[in-house]
């Protein structure tokens, strides 16, 4: 374990956006967790449980800032709640199978209260060594460069700032991207009577959220216990074809690699459909190809079509920010995720840990958190025992002088 001095290189430097010149020095007797999202909270709970002191630093002014500040209102968990709960604290029984984002936030607040976790807010770690990295796979928005976007003149926002389609009625809106965010934002806009076009520049796996009354995720997990990944993919795609029909005729080309293999190899999450497909079938959401450039009030697509549009929502994804602040480490690769793939990506060298970079959402974060908390607690107990022995030996030496 290391004594960490904030704002004193080379350990941890924090940045208070309120006051650039704020200088504070805090000695921490125990691990430092960076990020108070589900991953950071889960590790903190594990450490509390085992009596290890720690500090959590969070750049926002609340826990779970992704969920509280950077997600749209209609968001629900896509997987059944038993796959999303954090260690040692189940969801309340009266929560529905797919809790809303507001219920999930309430759950996380009770989690922090139950384990008495008090993060230090408004602390952005700018540079650090030796700690628990829990800053998330989705800490920064991806904003691609598009020719002519500056001259477009309409309203442009990223999906992380999108709350609801209220106020978009009658507007022509272009949603860029067809991941889970792009699909759901398109659905929401459509439900609010916006004329919605969705850019699908490559291919995408759209799966139903449920297969014959069971969550698709659960079905996949069950099959994977008995069969190889490629075979599970084949079975899933047959079932999906039976349920959804051929989606390629609507412009949703399927990747040549199966959904689980694609997730495993490239980290690309399949879309779990919760209603957008129906709107695409009925023509209410128009699927369009990639963007060539923007023009004033218009967009030109790669097939030469020109569309009049009023607003653009960039549902173009997120990336990790770890390489920008975690110094001198070969634990993370340039894309900000641990070099060792799941399930071995949680432990680096010299007391460095990562939680929540498994590409497996909340269930992956919980597994990491349990491993990290156990590992730290083990070294903590060994170290404290060692220190006690040394102090006792010194004490004996002291006594023998008299
Ligand atoms: C729209 C959307 C919906 C999602 N829905 C689901 C879902 O239904 N199920 C699921 O399993 N997963 C879902 N995910 C994935 C989701 O990101 C994770 O499951 C979950 O939030 C991961 O928790 P985390 O704590 O690892 O990361 P985050 O929730 O991103 O928390 C990281 C925290 O670290 C803080 N931070 C970042 N950088 C710094 C810094 N330098 N210094 C200090 N603090 C910092 C952030 O402010 C943030 O509070 C969704 C993601 C998005 C974007
Ligand atoms: N309720 C839920 O569970 C829920 C809801 C929303 C999000 N999420 C999760 O949050 C994470 C992020 O999801 P996301 O949908 O925001 O991001 P994402 O899955 O990374 O999807 C980004 C999309 O943007 C497209 N894109 C990127 N750059 C583009 C460009 N220049 N032109 C056109 N298209 C471009 C990508 O196309 P290419 O594929 O061609 O690159 C892709 O379709 C995922 O893990 C997702 O599952 C979960």
Image (cartoon, grey):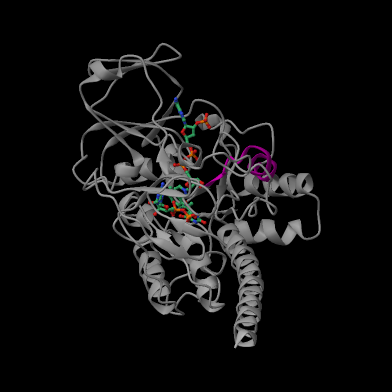
The quadrant holding residue 227 is: bottom right
- Residue 190 position in % (x across, y down): 32, 42
Whether residue 274 can be seen here: yes
Secondary structure, magenta segment, majority class: helix
Q: What span is colored magenta in the figure?
A: 259-271
199 relative position to 219: left or right: left
Residue at figure coordinates x 34%, y 61% from the top left? 120
16 drawn magenta: no
Whether residue 98 can be seen here: no
Q: Nearer the viewer, residue 28 or 287?
A: 28
The quadrant holding residue 82 is: bottom right
**Quadrant position of the C terminus in the picture:** bottom right
Q: How many labels does the image show?
A: 0
Residue farthest to the front? 402
Residue at figure coordinates x 55%, y 30% from the top left? 249
267 relative position to 31: left or right: right
Residue at figure coordinates x 30%, y 14% from the top left? 148
Q: Nearer the viewer, residue 270 or 143?
A: 143
**Quadrant position of the N terminus in the picture:** bottom right
Q: Which of 368 and 272 is in front in this view?
A: 368
Q: In this view, does 155 lie above or below 12?
A: above
Residue farthest to the top? 304
- Residue 7 position in % (x across, y down): 37, 49
- Residue 143 position in % (x across, y down): 39, 30
- Residue 35 position in % (x across, y down): 43, 55
């Amino acid at each position: 374990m290391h004594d960490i001095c904030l704002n004193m290189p080379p350990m941890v430097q924090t940045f208070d956006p309120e006051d650039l010149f704020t200088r504070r020095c805090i000695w921490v007797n125990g691990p430092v967790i960076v990020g108070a999202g589900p991953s950071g909270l889960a590790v903190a709970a594990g450490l509390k449980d085992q009596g290890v002191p720690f500090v959590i630093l969070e750049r926002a002014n609340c826990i779970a800032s992704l969920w509280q500040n950077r997600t749209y209102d209609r968001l629900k968990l896509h997987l059944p709640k038993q796959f999303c709960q954090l260690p040692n604290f189940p969801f309340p029984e009266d929560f529905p199978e797919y809790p809303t984002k507001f219920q999930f936030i309430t759950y996380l607040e009770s989690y922090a209260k139950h384990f008495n976790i008090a993060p230090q807010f408004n602390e952005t770690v700018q540079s650090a060594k030796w700690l628990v990295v829990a800053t998330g796979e989705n800490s920064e928005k991806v904003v691609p460069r598009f020719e002519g976007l500056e001259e477009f003149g309409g309203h442009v926002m990223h999906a992380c700032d999108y709350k609801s389609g209220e106020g978009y009625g009658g507007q022509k809106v272009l949603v860029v991207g067809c991941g889970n965010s792009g699909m759901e934002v398109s659905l929401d806009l459509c439900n609010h009577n916006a004329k919605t076009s969705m850019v699908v520049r490559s291919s995408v796996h759209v799966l139903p959220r449920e297969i014959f009354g069971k969550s698709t995720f659960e079905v996949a997990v069950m099959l994977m216990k008995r069969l190889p990944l490629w075979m599970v993919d084949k079975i899933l795609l047959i079932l999906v074809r039976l349920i959804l029909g051929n989606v390629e005729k609507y412009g949703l080309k399927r990747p040549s690699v199966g959904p689980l293999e694609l997730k495993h190899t490239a980290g690309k999450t399949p879309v779990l459909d919760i209603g957008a497909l129906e709107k695409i079938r009925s023509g209410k959401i128009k699927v369009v190809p990639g963007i060539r450039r923007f023009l004033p009030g218009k967009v030109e697509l790669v097939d030469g079509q020109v569309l009049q549009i009023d607003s653009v929502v960039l549902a173009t994804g997120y990336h990790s920010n770890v390489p920008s602040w975690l110094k001198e480490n070969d634990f993370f690769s340039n894309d900000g995720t641990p070099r060792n793939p799941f399930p071995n990506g949680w432990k680096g060298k010299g007391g460095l840990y990562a939680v929540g970079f498994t590409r497996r959402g909340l269930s992956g974060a919980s597994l990491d958190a349990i491993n990290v908390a156990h590992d730290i607690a083990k070294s903590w107990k060994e170290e404290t025992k060692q220190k006690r022995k040394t102090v006792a030996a010194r004490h004996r030496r002291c006594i023998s002088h008299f």
